[in-house]
Amino acid sequence: MPKGKATGKSPGKPARQLLFSEALRQQKLPLAEDPPPRPHINRNMAEGTQGASMDRVLQEISVVGHKLEGMDSAMAALTAETRSMCLEIAGFQSQISGLDQRVTTVETHIASWTDRDQEFLHLCSKLTELEDRSRRNNIRLLGFPEGIEGTDTLSYLRDILLKLTDKTFDPPLEFETVHRLGPKRQDGKGRPRPIVACLLRHEQAHQLLQAARAQGPLRLGTLEIRLSADFSKETADRRRAFLSLRPRLRHLDVKFGLFKPARMWITKNGESRTFYNPEDLRIFLERLQEQTQPMETTAQTPQDTQGISPGVGHL
């Protein structure tokens, strides 16, 4: 077949490569295999840049070194402080151990004393009873002005008591001691001190108290004289606490009586009870009040200051 004439066949492989290269040149596109152009680098500029970078790196290393040195000193101080705290904690532990032992000892003693509470209270009550028994021959006289007895108090009381009570005694009244309580008042003002008289016979002291209670308030001119039994402080306080409950007892229509040395007897609806502790009586009255109407305020009357039963006195 003559050259140059077209045929129906496609060109061969070398011809196709030539045509593709020609097309790339015409479009001014670089071949994929060609490397990108490299920029022109100045040697002096590169060396200057590297030197500056090294300086910065050295500066940063120096800064880090200084910081590390500061951290080393801080760690040394922290280590010393931690060691000191460890020593203090060890001291605290030894102290706590000692305190634990002391607390254990105290608890042991308390446990042993708890079992003796009842015995201790019993002994206290026995001491109070013994003191009250040692005062059973005493009577207290209230209302005598200071100095009215003169220089012979014993003779004055013997005569004035017979006159006030209008009673004779056989054998005659005999006193062991007579004295006023407390220091003498220099100004002569204020409430006169009570007189305590110790009689030789207990029966005579009891008879004087009964006669004074039967006659009511004793009068010496315009003066009101009162006689009462002599009790220990503990017994006197309990008696005052019992007597302070009298308005409530009257309001609740409760019959009552205060007996020696300090016990309150009550009767309500035919049932009688005896109280030795004022607090127990107060709780009983509160329960009784809840079963009745609310209690109205009751003012004390002049009779509240007088004896209400055998054994009342020493207000």
Image (cartoon, rainbow, N blue to C red):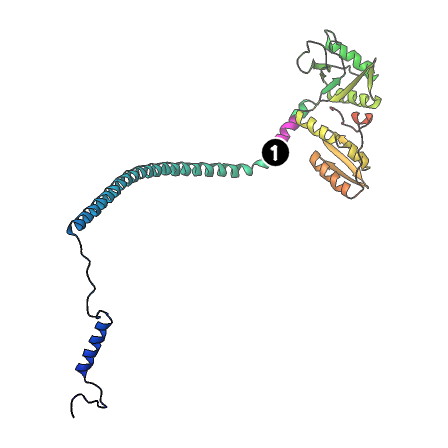
The secondary structure making up most of the magenta span is helix
SS for dot 1: helix
- Say which of 159 and 8 sits in front: 8
| Image height of 63 relative to 139, above or below | below
Magenta stretch?
120-130
**Residue 276 visible in the picture:** no
**With 121 as the anchor, is 267 left or right in this view?**
right
Foreground residue, 228 or 199? 228
Q: Nearer the viewer, residue 308 or 103?
A: 103
Which residue corresponds to the image point at 71% horizontal and 39% vertical from the top-left?
Answer: 283
Query: Mark 1 — residue?
Result: 121
Farthest bottom residue in view: 1
Q: Is residue 223 magenta?
A: no
> Where does residue 307 sit, x and y in percent of width and height?
79, 26
Quadrant of the image containing the C terminus: top right
Quarter of the view holding residue 230: top right
Q: Position of residue 179 (x, y in %)?
A: 69, 13
User: Looking at the picture, which amino acid does disc 1 mark?
Assistant: Leu
Q: Could you classify mark 1 by the number of other residues whose Cα lies within 10 Å: few (under 14), some (14-19), or many (20 or more)?
A: few
Picture coordinates of residue 254 (x, y %)? Answer: 80, 37
Q: Give the position of the N terminus as an image quadrant.
A: bottom left
Residue at 63%, 30% in the rendered image: 126
Residue 15 appearing in the image = yes
Identity of the residue drawn at 82% across and 18% down: 218
- Identity of the residue furthest to the top in this view: 151
Dividing the picture into quarters, in which one does residue 199 lie? top right
Identify whether 249 is placed above or below 165.
Answer: below
Name the spot of residue 261 as percent of width and height, x first. 71, 28
Looking at the rendered structure, the number of numbered marks drawn on it comes to 1
